[in-house]
Image: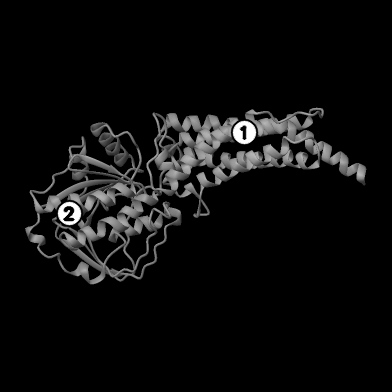
Amino acid sequence: MAGVIRSIAVLAIALGSFLAMPAAGAQDEATVNAVLFFSPTCGHCEYVINETLPPLYVEHGGPWEVYYDDTLPDSEVAFYILGNGTLEFLLVDVSVAPGAELFMAATERYDIPSNGVPRLVIDDQWYIGSGDIPAELPGIVAEGTAGEGIGWPDIPGIDDALAAVPASAVVTTSTTSTTTTAPGSTTTAGSSTSSSSTSTTTTTTSGSDTTTTTEAGGVFPVGGDGESVAERFGRDPVGNSISVVVLAGMLASLAALVVVARRPGGNRSLGIAVPIIAVLGMVVAAYLTYVETADAEAVCGPVGDCNTVQQSEYAELFGVIPIGLLGLVGYAVVLVTWLVARAEHNPISDWARVALLAGTVAGVAFSIYLTFLEPFVIGATCAWCLTSAVVITVLMLLAAGPGVDSLRRLRSIHELSN
């Protein structure tokens, strides 16, 4: 999150000497106004801010100023204006209550079906994601600056948001070397990489008082760090409550394994339900893999916010492996072990049943971790992820009896051989 916080101050892609001079013909350009909704934990937001906005400011108007209410604690600042007279962008932090309210007002005003960020509203049109925004924004800005300009979008409450930003500015001129991972290969904040060597001159103006300081690296306070667990849960109480129910069900299912393990042994078999349910899990995992690797927008349905979850730093394991791809491989392994386990009873098929049980238990344990993150850390629920969690839990319950029976047989063989 710290990388996002500081990168927004200078948009993390300052282009050295280009920022020290106004763009050619900037005086002849009309003003373009837009609203960009972002979250500090969203890697796609960081990519749009780092890669899309800076070249536009350089091309249209030159160096920018950052306006915000610096009398508020960092965790309470929701609105920032980035402006240079030609481009005026209102950046809205949706993790802060006033920002979330404006976000919902825009959702209702334009009947936007997704709660994903980054979300750009410009000229009363909206664009979502680090694919559509970089593709569409440069052309919209060029057309607007060459014509009569673009006013602020008609979002209920935007006047109050603009009024909440006082006439104080942090003016930053930097020489920065920065690398930001493209969302096509890395889409999360946790795995985005920023390396910079920055000499920053900052002038803060408030009324008639001006203070100038020089420091290494720009600092731009962004809210979100002080958000409580209750506030995160409250972003989507219905969806997050469903996550808690699923989480409780998975924990209860693990406890049920103890009961199964204590039952007398038998010769319980793995039925045809296992591959059917595993194929369902593969379909879900394949879709999530597509969303995570193709920078696509998920179809979320009426409950939850899949895109916020998929754009979080937790959508990849170790910042490298998409969680959807991990699930896809896991369900494929379930199918293979089921085929081996369906053979006549022998040590190999017994080991396959034990492996199937162990693998599904591990899958449920990992799903418990991921499901816990949704309501209590991310503050959003992914219906696709919950579906996968339910699927792996059902598979574990189906594998429990046969797996325990096979483990007992293998132990008996081992004891007899000794």
Query: Mark 1 to mark 2: distance in Å?
Result: 56 Å
Which residue is rendered at x = 81% and y = 28% of the image?
A: 266
Dot 1 lies on which element? helix
x%, y% of residue 311? 41, 46
Label 2: few (<14), some (14–19) or many (≥20) C-alpha neighbours in 10 Å: many
* Amino acid carrying mark 1 in the image: Pro
Judging by the rendered image, the residue that carries numbered circle 1 is 275
Depth check, front residue: 87 or 268 = 268
Q: Quadrant of residue 157?
A: top left
x%, y% of residue 414? 87, 44
Q: Is residue 183 left or right of residue 20?
A: right
Q: Is residue 125 left or right of residue 288?
A: left
x%, y% of residue 93? 32, 46
Between disc 1 and disc 2, the foreground one is 1
* Amino acid carrying mark 2 in the image: Leu
Image disc number at residue 367: none
Considering the image in quadrants, where does the N terminus appear? bottom left
